[in-house]
Image (cartoon, rainbow, N blue to C red):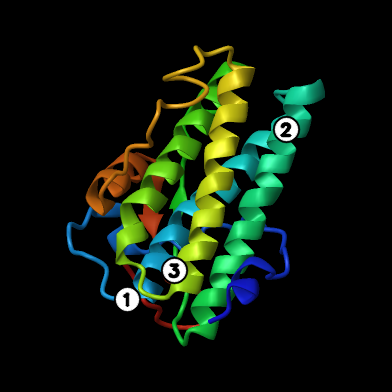
Amino acid sequence: MKRRDFIKGSVAAVPGSVALQMLGTRFALAQTADFGSDIDVLNYALTLEYLEAEFYRQGNAANLLTGKEATYLAKIGADENAHVSAITQTVQKLGGTPVPSPAVDFADSFSSRDNFLKTSHTFENLGVQAYLGAAGFIKDKDVLQAAAGIFGVEARHAAVVGNLLNLEPEGGVYMGPNETPKTKAQVLAAAGPFIKTASAAAGGAATTL
């Protein structure tokens, strides 16, 4: 797998009805098992990217933001769609099957401008911690380099949103001199409350986490 094949995947829009078809039943049940392959790691990352892509689709459609804030969050949503497209294509090129998804419920995340931005900040930092926590399991150096590229973008997203929220520089806009990784179980436990039901993706069985 070449790094350019990972990062240059075509960017596809994520329709709301299928936006989370990469989240499997086992995603909602925090698992402590290590990743068995690069495809496992990629599918794990894909679950988070689909969660984020749908979050921004719904949040941006709610028209809670204006001006610079609306522009930034729209760009972040587009980035998450690009991540979904690139990771999906990479899983397929490696001979794997993208994981299926459940429906989601973001509760009151879109009840106000502040809730939207605060939940965005939480998701972006969770993504940073998830990529960092899984990095050591990646065997293909090209996949690792491309994943590191997405990791960096997620960190920048978190910083942008932290700045929009007028958070303190250290511990808010950025998390300190070093990022803190989270285990798979910790990440899935944090994301689990947003998952309503599991459903099979169209096209048959798929590899799950």
Q: Amino acid at mark 2?
A: Tyr
Q: Is residue 72 left or right of residue 129?
A: right
Q: Is residue 79 above or below residue 67?
A: below
CA separation, marks 2 and 1?
35 Å
Q: Residue furthest left?
A: 32
Instruction: Report if the CB atoms under discs 3 and 1 are less than 8 Å apart.
Output: no
N-terminal label among 2 and 1: 1
Q: Nearer the viewer, residue 195 or 77?
A: 77
> Which residue, as the protein is rendered here, is positioned at the far bottom?
95
Q: Amino acid at mark 1?
A: Ser
Q: Quadrant of the C terminus?
A: bottom left
Q: Which residue is mark 3?
A: 100
Splitting the image into 4 quarters, where does residue 163 fall?
Answer: top right
Q: Name the residue that disc number 1 marks.
A: 37
Q: Is residue 18 visible?
A: no
Which numbered disc covers residue 72? 2
Say which residue appears at 54% left-offset and 33% top-offset: 158
Q: Which element carries disc 1, helix, strand or loop?
A: loop
Does dot 3 land on a helix, a strand or a loop? loop
Residue 45 x %, y %: 44, 59
Q: Is 141 on the left or on the right of 146, as rendered?
A: left
Q: Residues within 10 Å of mark 2 (few under 14, many from 20)?
A: some
Q: Residue 49: percent from the left, percent from the top?
A: 52, 54
- The local secondary structure at tag 2 comes to helix
User: Which dot, 3 or 1, sits closer to the camera?
Assistant: 1
Give the mark, 3 or 1, whose residue is nearer the N terminus.
Answer: 1
The Cα atoms of the two marked residues, 3 and 1, are separated by 18 Å
Residue situated in front as seen by the camera: 58 or 121: 121
x then y, percent, for residue 40: 35, 71
